[in-house]
Image (cartoon, rainbow, N blue to C red):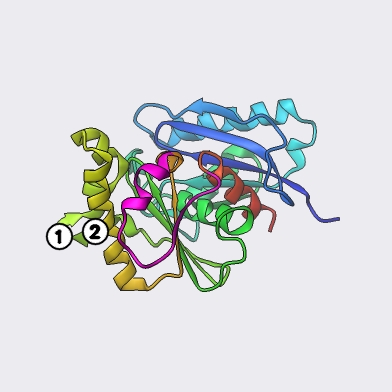
Amino acid sequence: MATTHAIGIDIGGTGIKGAIVDLATGELVSDRRKVATPEGGRPADILDATVDLLAELDDADSEAPRLPVGVCFPAVVKRGLTLSAANISKEWIGLPAEQKFEEELGRDIHFINDADAAGVAELRYGAAVGTEGLVILTTLGTGIGSAFIYDGVLVPNSELGHLEIDGHDAEDRAAYSAMEREELSWTDWAKRLDRYYQVVEALFSPDLFIVGGGVSKHHEQFLPLLQIDTPIVPAVHRNNAGILGAASLASE
């Protein structure tokens, strides 16, 4: 019988959160559990914290120990290796991270980049449902994450936050953290976002942009200020997107 539920775990620079997901609806069927990401984000510490989180889910639901597990992570992920590290220790770079998580958690997992997981969540349960062609999701937060979805298929590890635009790493000027750090108005920040999306639009000619990250709940403050031709909409799933996407992929 096909699996109807799975566990998604989303590891970030400040928190590690997880829940059990109904794969048919994309709804959480357990409380969302969260533990703090250990200071410094070193491998052994994050692994221990993730073990603790999964134990909480296992204790809370008798079904949980038998469910598939997906883990999303703030790094480029290729063949189970983490090839970068965003807001976590650089010790992750080059590690066989998927294998280490499986060893510590005591079960097989699906391991994926966090923005890619968010893209899958929007594809299956959110703003990209039924969209043909190229969908580009961007998450605006401490940095800029991105996900490419083409005709319903994920093209992983796009890393569009690190495009060089006007001599700068794009996320240094256009991430939400830049707005907070420099105390920019919505209008001034939107000018930087507009430049960013104009460049991405010119390079890839997408059919739809989706804007995720916590700031997307304030989308009415900045999306109407953008002067691009491609339709751009807020993400449906913000804080839960990584959990949903990772769980959905784990079921496969």
160 with respect to 125 (left or right): left
Which image quarter: residue 53?
top right
x and y percentages locating residue 119 in the rendered image: 51, 56
- Lateral position of residue 186 relative to residue 158, left or right: left
Q: Is residue 151 above or below residue 169?
A: below
Q: Which residues are magenta?
A: 218-237
The residue singled out by tag 2 in the image is 195
The residue depicted at 37 percent of the width and 54 percent of the height is 83
Q: Residue furthest right?
A: 1
- For the residues marked 1 and 2, what is the alpha-carbon distance in whole angstroms? 9 Å
Q: Nearer the viewer, residue 170 or 41?
A: 170
Question: Looking at the image, can residue 227 be seen?
Answer: yes
Question: Which of the marked residues, 1 or 2, is nearer the chain's N terminus?
Answer: 1
Q: What residue type is disc 1 on?
A: Asp
Residue 166 numbered tag: 1
**Numbered disc 2: secondary structure:** helix
Residue 223 forms part of the magenta stretch:
yes
Q: Give the residue at x 72% y 36%.
A: 29
Dot 1, how many residues are within 10 Å of its Cα: few (below 14), some (14-19), or many (20+)?
few
